[in-house]
Amino acid sequence: MSTFLGMPALPVYGSGNLHASESFPKSAHRELGNAQLRSNLGHATRTIRDKRTQVVSELPDWEQLRDAGSAIKESVMARLPELLEAFEQNFTARGGVIHWARDAGEANRIVAGLIRDTGETEVVKVKSMATQEIGLNEYLEEQGIAAFETDLAELIVQLDHDKPSHILVPAIHKNRTQVRDIFLREMENVDPDLTNEPSKLAAAARTHLRRKFLTAKVAVSGANFALADSGTLAVVESEGNGRMCLTLPETLITVMGIEKLLPTWQDLEVFMQLLPRSSTGERMNPYTSLWTGVTEGDGPQNVHLVLLDNGRSAALADEMGRSALHCIRCSACMNVCPVYERTGGHAYGSTYPGPIGAILSPLMTGIQAEENDSLPYASSLCGACYDACPVKINIPDILVHLRSVDVDSKRGTKKVPNQMDVGMKAASWALSSGKRLGLIEKGLPLSRLAAGPNKKITKLPGIAAGWTQSRDIPAPPTQSFRAWWNKEHHTPDAGVGTPLKKEEQP
Amino acid sequence: MRIALFATCIVDAMYPATARATVKILERLGHEVVFPSGQACCGQMHVNSGYLKEALPVVANHVRAFDTEDYDVAVAPSGSCVASVKHQHPMVARSCGDADLEARAAAVGARIYELSELLVDVLGVTDAGAQLGSFFPHRVTYHPSCHGMRLLRLGDRQARLLATVQGIDMVDLPEADQCCGFGGTFSMKNADVSSAMLEDKTATIKTTGASLCAGGDASCLMHIGGGLSRQGSSITTLHLAEILASTMDEPASVTGEVLVSTGKAAR
C-alpha cells in the first residue's frame, strides 16, 4: 500500500482575491448609493452592449461558433490532465520552464523567486486576471518588488490605489474627468494643464509607460490561451502594451489558470472570432501575440510559465458547475447583467465580478468561504448572461445549482431555522396539494383587512418587508379561480386528485 | 381540442380574472377546457431559492395532477411557470434520484404551452380582433418577461397578438428586454438591487404615455404594478389574457385592483 505523504485532502480550494468579505446585499446597498458610479456604469455597459449586439448580428454562423466554442472547452475539461502534460512537454522542448502552483500562495512565491533570481526590483505587467486573482502585485510589493501595470485602465486603477471593477474594463466605474484628476495627482511629470479629452489622457499615459517599457528587464503576463499541440501561449489585447511587455524584456513570466488550454492551433480560429466580438465589440482583435518557448536572439531569453490551479480542480469536480471553467474572460455577461450594471464589480468582492464571478468564485473557494454563499443569489435569473456567453455557460442553471449547494450545506447546522427555511418548508406543504392550496385560498380574503380602503398592502413583516420597501401588493380577491371553477362546474369544492403517496408527503 | 389549464398558483390565488380570461379565450375558439383539480404550483420558487428537497413534493404533485388527467395539450398563462415545468421538473426529479418521476415530468412538460405559444403555434390565431373578438380601446405598452423571452423563445408572439386587438394603441417600451427585477425571492433577498431595477423599468414605462403595461406573467406584472402603485402612478398592469378576452360587450377591468371574481363579467 502506498501512502502519499503531504498530499492535501481533495478538493483543494482556491485562495487569494476570490472572496466577498461582505455579503452581496450589504455591499450592493452601499454601491447603489453611489450615483456617479451608477451613471458611469449605466453609460459604459450600454455602450459596450450595443456594440456587441451589432457585431454579433453580422455573423450568420454566430450560434454555430458558440456551439463549437462550448464543445472545444468541454473536451478540454474532459481530458485536462492529458492536455496539460502534452503542453508541458512541448513548452519545455522549446526552451520554456514550467512551474506548477497549487494555490495563490505557491504561485506568488514562485513568481517572486524568479524575479529575485534576475536581480531586478521592478517589473512591467500585462493585464492579467490570474495575477489579480492571486494578489501578485501586493505580494511583490511586500517583497520589495514594484510591479507596474501597463494596460491603460489597469494603470488608472493602480495609480488611484483602487481595485478593478470589471475584468475587461477595470476602470469602468470612473469617467474621464475622474481619470484626469487621478493622473494629475499621481503621475510623475504630468502636464498640469491636462484636460479630460481621451486623446490627451492616452498621450499622457503613453509617455508615462514608454519609460517603463524601455527600462524593464522583467515582464509578468497572463495568457488567454495555451495550445497543447505546440506549447504556444497567446495574449489578446487592444493597446499594444502587451506586445511591448512580451517582446522587450529579457525575462518573461506568465501566470495562467490550467483551464486556459486549447487542444490545437486550429481551435484558436473559433476563439479569435468569439472573443473580440464578445468582449470589446470589435470584429478583429488589435494585438494578438503568440510565443512558443524561447527564440534565440529574439525576444525574452528566459521564458517561464506558472500553471495555476487555485481551486480550478475543485470547480472541475462539480459536475453541474464545471462548465464555469469554459470562461474565456470576455465579460459579455457582466455587460448585459442588470444586477452588475447597477452595483458595479466591487460589490462582488472577488476578482471575478458579475454573473460569471457569482458562480466561479464560490466554485473555486467552496460555498462556505467567507461571504461567497451570498453570491449565487445576486441574480434575478433573467438569463441575459447565458444568451450573451460566447461559450454557452448556462450561468442561471449553475446559480440555481449553487443555491441548492448552499441550502444543503446548512441543513441541520442551524440551532434555529431562519425565516426562509421555515417559509419554504411551509410552502412546500401548502403547494404540494390542490386541496391544501384551495383551503389556504379560502383564508386569503381575510388579508383584505390588512389592505385597508385603497385595497393595497403596503407593509409586510420579516423578510417580506424587502418586497414592500418599494412595492405594494394588491388585496387578494374574495374568491380564488379554483373556487370559482368548482362552483361553475359543480365539482366538489377544493377537490383533489389522487391522495398523496406517503413518500411524496413533505 | 381538450385543453388542460394550469392556472399557476399566483393566478389561482391572486389573479383569478387572468385564468378566467384564459378559459374564455379557449372556449371562444371552440375548445373544451379542463382544470385538473390536484394542481397547485410549479415549485419554481423552491427550485430558484435552492430548496430542491422541498421542491420535490411540489413537482411530484404537479406531475401527478397532469399525468392522470385526459387532455390533448396543457396551457398556462405564464412563460416562467411553463419553463419551470419543462426544464426544472425533470432536473429536480433527477437530482433527487427519482427516475420514474423524471420520465413522467418530461412527458408532462412536453405537452404544455405558454398561452401565446398555444394560440399562435397550435390554434392558429393570427388576428385576435377577428378570431377572438378582442377589443380594448386603451393605450398599452408591453413588457416581455425574461423567462418567456429567453427560456421559451416566445419571440414576438405576445406582442403580435396584442397588436391585432381592435381599438388598442400599442406603444413600444424602451429597453423592453431588461428584467423588471422581480426574480422571485431575489426581490426580498436582494431588495435594494431589485428595487433599483424596478425603478428603471417603471421609469421607461412612464415615458411611453401608456395607461397600462401588459405582459404574459402575473408575477412580473404584480411586481411592476406594485412599484407603479407605490410611486403613486395611475398606470396599471394587466395580463395579456385579459386583454385578449376583453370584448366590446365584456370589457376588461383596467383598475389594477384584483377582481372580485364572483360577478358574471369583469367590471
Image (tube, coloured by chain):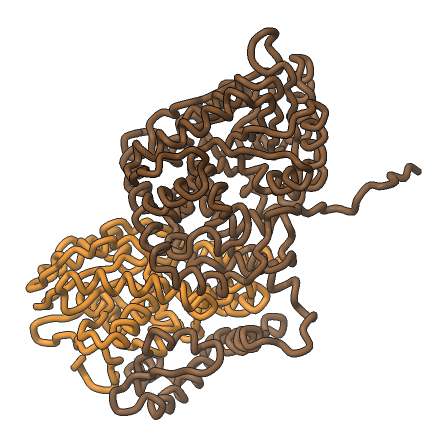
Chain colours: A brown, B orange
A415 w.r.t. B186: above or below:
below
Q: Nearer the viewer, residue B116 or A488?
A: B116
Q: Position of residue A444 (x, y in %)?
A: 39, 86
Q: Residue at x 27, y 67 (%)?
A: B32
B243 w.r.t. A47: above or below:
below
Q: Residue at x 63, y 14 (%)?
A: A301
Residue A484 placement: quadrant: bottom left
Q: Residue at x 16, y 53 (%)?
A: B126
Quadrant in which the N terminus of chain A appears: top right
The answer to whether residue B81 shows anywhere in this view is no
The image shows a total of numbered marks equal to 0
Q: Residue at x 41, y 89 (%)?
A: A443
The answer to whether residue B40 shows anywhere in this view is yes
The single residue placed furthest to the top in the displayed view is: A297
Q: Nearer the viewer, residue A490 or A428?
A: A428
Q: Nearer the viewer, residue A53 or A397?
A: A53
Quadrant in which the C terminus of chain A appears: bottom right
Q: Position of residue A229 (x, y in %)?
A: 60, 18
Q: Position of residue B140 (x, y in %)?
A: 15, 64
Residue A94 placement: quadrant: top right
The single residue placed furthest to the right in the displayed view is: A1
Residue B42 placement: quadrant: bottom left
A166 w.r.t. A223: above or below:
below
Q: Nearer the viewer, residue B263 or A268?
A: A268
